[in-house]
Image: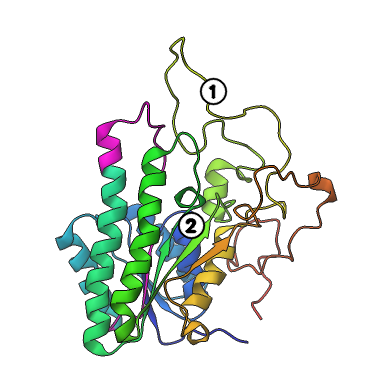
Amino acid sequence: MEISLEGRVALVTGAGPNIGSGISLALARYGASVACNDIDAGAAKASVERIERNGGTAVAVPGDVTDEEQVLAAITRTVDRFGKIDILVNNAAVLGGRGVLDESTEFFKRAVEVAAMGNFLFTKHVGRHMAERGIRGSVVAISSSNGWSGSAGVIAYAFHKGGVNNFVRAAAMDLAPYGIRVNTVTPTAPTPDNPDLIAAQGPGGVLERPRKAGIGGATGDEEWRRPSRWTGERPPMVPMGTTGTPTDLGHMVAWLCSDYARLVTGCDFVVDGGARAKNFAYHPAPGADLVGPAPLIPLDVTGDLDTDVNREMP
């Protein structure tokens, strides 16, 4: 099976520098022209540059996903450049935050607004673009393990990712009559594989450097406080030993956007090495005893990664 997105146009929100950049690159390597949206114009530009140095075609369409005029402007710039939109990836989200006892009203509102309005506005207007032109397109929203199960220290993130999951199922029903498919892909803290990001923060991910408070911030130091999670040494908690990288997510998104997935809609696809599937009491074998997954099929042909980045896709 050879996946090809040749002739298709994708718009990716939250396009840099980790998951969004990886998915954007994957879609380009599979043949799509890609419009990279991010509220940070520099991040959108960096994603475009990464695609171009790997032989792809892309354009930066920065803007705030919560502002309808800016959303429409990004869509218009994409269509003006490439003529249409076949693929939409809703990835924009606000990371960080705190637990329910400590989160601020301002942060909670902003985090929820970015997810809610970003998914709604882009899906509405790109969906209308597809429906009006008879494009049997694909919409993919990026969820999170925090949207399916509880984790301390990320109340806003957990709330809006859970909302994304049911938004996708409902939108899939609305858009099914038009042949437009809507699905989610669920990662679990993937290890960065963008050479620029690795250069800035170093290699490795949460398995190598566990975060004491998840993706959330610190809590208070009152006498009545109780710890929210185990912070000592722990075995690798992922059955396959790794949660993967944005490249793994990119391969999945590319397949979902291809004709091979023509009847797949309203579904979730988990790319996390078995992290979400395991029972709470399950402890994997020691890391040294795990065989691990098959070698990664890389997409970035530049950079100093552990994988052979010059290996061609099949």
Viewer can see residue 87: yes
Along the viewing direction, whichever of 278 and 292 lies nearer the viewer? 278
Q: Where is mark 1, residue-wise? A: 227
Tell me what residue is drawn at x 21 percent, y 86 percent. 132
Tell me what residue is drawn at x 71 percent, y 30 percent. 233
Circle 2 crowding by C-alpha within 10 Å: few under 14, some 14–19, many from 20 = many
Q: Does 250 appear above or below 32?
A: above
Magenta span: helix, strand or loop, mainly?
A: loop
Quadrant of res 211: top right
Q: Where is mark 2, residue-wise? A: 19
Tell me the amino acid under the disc marked 1: Pro
Percent position (x, y) of residue 151?
A: 50, 40
Circle 1 crowding by C-alpha within 10 Å: few under 14, some 14–19, many from 20 = few
The nearer-to-camera label among 2 and 1 is: 1
Q: Is residue 177 magenta?
A: no
The colour scheme applied to this rendered structure is rainbow
Tell me what residue is drawn at x 27 percent, y 43 percent. 110
Question: Going by the image, does 54 lie left or right of 164?
Answer: right
Q: What element carries label 1?
A: loop
Q: Does 242 appear above or below 83?
A: above
- Dot 2 or dot 1, earlier in sequence: 2
- Magenta stretch in the rendered image: 83-109
